[in-house]
């Protein structure tokens, strides 16, 4: 049996981060938490997760800058990233594509259902498999 996928969850709201962590663990994922962008960057470069779920607005390093730094490093550039936000408008969508330009996957907002977040995780897992099969 292969080990569970590692997911880094980054949110400065401890309650939201814990909620996501518990639910991902129930789905069989290994979850690492960070509460700011700098800590997330360290976790990602140290633990090489399969996916990162990143809050858009955080202290020290916001989600956009975190993703820019990940994309600039060849070791972390292929990492699938889901952007999250407590804003009512998603940080990455067709009307606000800044995150897409830096390679963010579909995002979650506070109104997102757990079903949608699970679907995004599954999509990220498929994305990682496709990238691996290409030898990238």
Image (cartoon, helix red, strand yellow):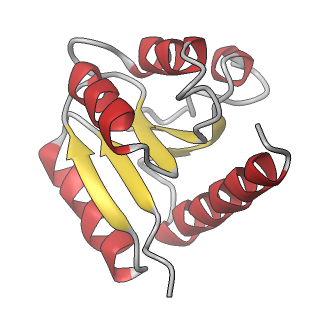
Q: Is residue 106 placed above or below 117 in the rendered structure? A: above
Point out residue 91 in the picture as x, y percentages from the top left corner: 56, 27
**Where is residue 63, by image quadrant?**
top left
Left or right of 93 on screen, residue 113: left
At 66% from the left and 14% from the top, the residue drawn is 98
At 36% from the left and 47% from the top, the residue drawn is 8
Most extreme residue toward the front is: 135
Q: Is residue 66 placed above or below 88 in the rendered structure? A: above
Toward the viewer: 61 or 134? 134
**Where is residue 60, by image quadrant?**
top left
Toward the viewer: 68 or 97? 68
At 43% from the left and 32% from the top, the residue drawn is 87
At 35% from the left and 22% from the top, the residue drawn is 57
Point out residue 96 in the picture as x, y percentages from the top left corner: 69, 19
Most extreme residue toward the left is: 14
Q: Is residue 119 placed above or below 11 in the rendered structure? A: below
Most extreme residue toward the bottom is: 1
Q: Is residue 12 placed above or below 17 in the rendered structure? A: above
Left or right of 14 on screen, residue 131: right
Total numbered labels: 0
Left or right of 131 on screen, residue 74: left
Q: Quadrant of the C terminus?
A: top right
Point out residue 13 in the picture as x, y percentages from the top left corner: 18, 40
Point out residue 70 in the picture as x, y percentages from the top left corner: 50, 21
Left or right of 101 on screen, residue 46: left
């Amino acid at each position: 049996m292969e080990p569970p996928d590692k997911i880094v969850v980054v949110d400065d709201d401890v309650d939201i981060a814990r909620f996501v962590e518990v639910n991902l663990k129930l789905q069989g994922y290994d979850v690492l938490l960070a509460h700011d962008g700098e800590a997330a960057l360290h976790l990602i470069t140290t633990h090489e997760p399969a996916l990162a779920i990143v809050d858009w607005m955080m202290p020290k390093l916001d989600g956009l800058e975190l993703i820019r730094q990940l994309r600039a490093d060849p070791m972390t550039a292929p990492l699938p990233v889901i952007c999250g936000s407590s804003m009512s408008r998603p940080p990455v969508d067709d009307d606000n594509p800044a995150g897409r330009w830096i390679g963010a996957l579909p995002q979650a907002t506070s109104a997102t259902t757990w079903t949608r977040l699970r679907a995004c995780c599954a999509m990220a897992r498929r994305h990682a498999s496709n990238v691996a099969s290409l030898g990238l």
